Image (cartoon, rainbow, N blue to C red):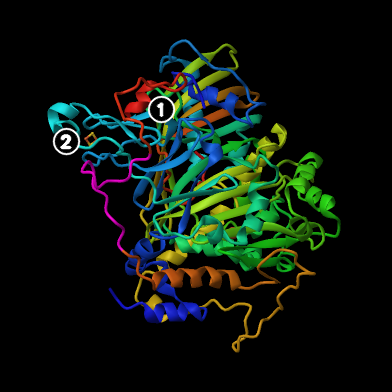
Amino acid sequence: MTDQTAVLRDVRRGMIPAHIYNDSETFALEKERLFGRAWLFVAHESEIPAPGDYVVRRVLEDSFIVTRDESGEIRAHFNMCLHRGMQVCRAEMGNASHFRCPYHGWSYRNDGRIVGLPFHQDAYGGEAGFRRKGQRLLPAPNLATYNGMIFISLDPDAPPLEDFLGDFRFYLDYYTRQSPSGIELRGPQRWRIKANWKIGAENFAGDMYHTPQTHTSVVEIGLFREPKAEKRKDGATYWAGNGGGTTYKLPPGDLDERLRYVGYPQEMIDRMKAAWSPQQSQVIGRDGFMISAASLFPNLSLVHNWPRVADSEAVLPFISIRQWQPISENETEVLSWFAVDAEAPEEFKALSYKAYLMCFGSTGMFEQDDVENWVSLTNTAAGSMARRLLLNSRMGLLEDGVQVSPTLTPDEFAGPGTARTGYSEYNQRELLNRWADHLERPQPRAATVEVGTGHGPDSCDAEPAGTDTAPRRSEGDPKETRS
Amino acid sequence: MSTDTTPPPIGGLSARSPLGAGASRLQRTGRTLPFGDRRHQEAHQWLTDETYLLDAQRYEEWLTLLTEDIHYLMPVRVTTALGSGYDTSPGMAHFDEDKYSLSRRVARFLTEHAWTEDPPSRMRHHIGNVRTFATADPDHLIAESSVLLFRSRGDVNEPALVSAGREDLLRRGPDGWLLARRTIMADEAVLRMQNLAVFL
Ligand code: FES
Ligand SMILES: [Fe+2]
């Protein structure tokens, strides 16, 4: 492998070697050192509300069954049978009390414990040959949730999720906690784009500069009134903890007026005011900044916009959460969810969903033009000329490091972290600096787990993993347990 | 999550959509119309003429073929176990459109700043397997078809394909048939196309 020291050094001074957007060696390092370590979003609790509900999600090539077990606990099982390694669950979502491997019929409860092992006595000589007791599908090395968002880390020594998120939680709440009930997530739409995964993450983190140009058409057709260049640069970008994002500056008004300006009905505003801290309310009500796009390192993005969804002046806000799931150095699977406050009126939910579809996702009129750019960029980054080009990602800084616009004071911006108004690439640099930190640090090889020998994963409890119990499920098809 | 054990007819998905309230609920009746039936021939010709407009990206003309109450729906397909009773993502779609949102999409293509189609894609909608059905209302027909969209952009990347089945509700208008409801069932859970800046 080529020495990456020079590349990482350039990245840290805001000079980006263009090939990092399409380079197989870089991607190999990202797999091992970044995606093998960072906290990664896999699902939201609202996607699996009932015991037995599951969704199957990947972290690069690793498939996980993210499920709510019979006791209500959220779990993520590595989707590989402990016998010969067959994929245990081949559906994408469903409800099952058990998963039965189609190859030789081993079965697992939805808490991961092995429960059925055909001919255990005849084939293995019982426990003396294969210790079934305490065996379970390999759990994700780390799992934690915030506002119902389920994250896993492949690093058993990952810092606590709360520490990883840090002060970005303050901003995450705007998207995921507009009431005590939090959000419900729908989707995702999934599609593949021939673009490097980092481009989307950087764009959502801080690229206010692209909005007036890339998204000219959505203003022209009356879909969104805000991205006009003058308006966009009055917004602030912020970075806090492991994430950052962009805002729009709203017209004068108090908190209620500004939330109404972007289309929230009063009953939702009342719940937001109760759910948010005084500082969270101040960013909007006192300082006039409304959150828009954001990214959480490494590959999760969020967006909040307020387009017109009918032939009237009224606007409707929507929220989308999206993941840039890397497939290779030049291909990304986009998973794009629609999110809405669970307590919102049904009418609002329907129109907010419409707003989402018109703007973002596989058919979204914003997203269409974004992706066209990113695919093009990725193609261009593949060759040898791109290796000679250091892209200047220093927007917002003079050559001597002096800031073009000053950091906002706590009186101007009530949120934690660092915020500035105007166009800049601070957030893109923050993202890529973290990327460089991971890429230069080797990831120790993870401990291996032996199946059935007594050196396996610890038994989670003393309950004997006895005979096959009949699938309890009344809802859902028992066949699903064979999937 | 559905508790049904049989998937609903495709056209029935429209009624389940959060945005499908205004759409016609008419469903097919009886067996397929014979290929020699005049109604079948008219529907088939309508689909072929429509396909020409979509390939040529003559979207303004295409809009005039849609009724004011159209529901244009393309659910998100999901992989589920056999017998689970559903294979679309509950409450989510790629397209879930009324005449207004479709008209905005068309208006956008007519601006000079819809970068995703400038330069334009080379597109070919291959349609086939056309079957038609009567409905309870003689002024409405159901037309089923399959569509394979081939889309090529630029000169670097491979072309992209979308394969789908469609069920259309056609309504007799003063100057010919109009599209009152379309349900598009993609054959992939994960689309292999950079966006759906297209119509199917
Ligand atoms: S691989 Fe043999 S039972 Fe799963
Ligand atoms: Fe954008």
Image location of residue B144, percent across then percent down: 46, 25
Q: Amino acid at mark 1?
A: Ser
- Chain letter of mark 2 equals A
Residue positioned most to the right: A253
Q: How dense is the environment of label 2, judged by Cα within 10 Å: few (below 14), some, or many (20 and up)?
A: few
Residue A39 is tagged as: none
Q: Is residue A53 depicted above or below A13 in this figure?
A: above
Mark 1 vs ligand 1: CB under 8 Å? no
Quadrant in which the C terminus of chain A is drawn: top left
Mark 2 vs ligand 1: CB under 8 Å? no
Image location of residue A302, percent across then percent down: 59, 54
- Residue shown at 48%/32% (left/top)? A71
Question: A106 left or right of A338?
Answer: left
Question: A440 left or right of A452?
Answer: right
The foreground one among A156 and B116 is A156
Q: Amino acid at mark 2?
A: Ala
Residue range of the region highlighted in magenta in the rendering = A445-460
- How far apart marks 2 and 1 lie (CA) works out to 28 Å
Residue pointed to by mark 2: A128
Question: A483 left or right of A317?
Answer: left
Q: Is disc 1 placed on a helix, strand or loop?
A: loop
The foreground one among A98 and B20 is A98
Q: Is disc 2 placed on a helix, strand or loop?
A: helix
Magenta stretch, main secondary structure class: loop
Query: Nearer the N terminus, badge 2 or badge 1?
Result: 1
Query: Splitting the image into four quadrants, where does ligand 1 fall?
Result: top left
Locate residue A138: give its quadrant.
top left
Residue pointed to by mark 1: A97
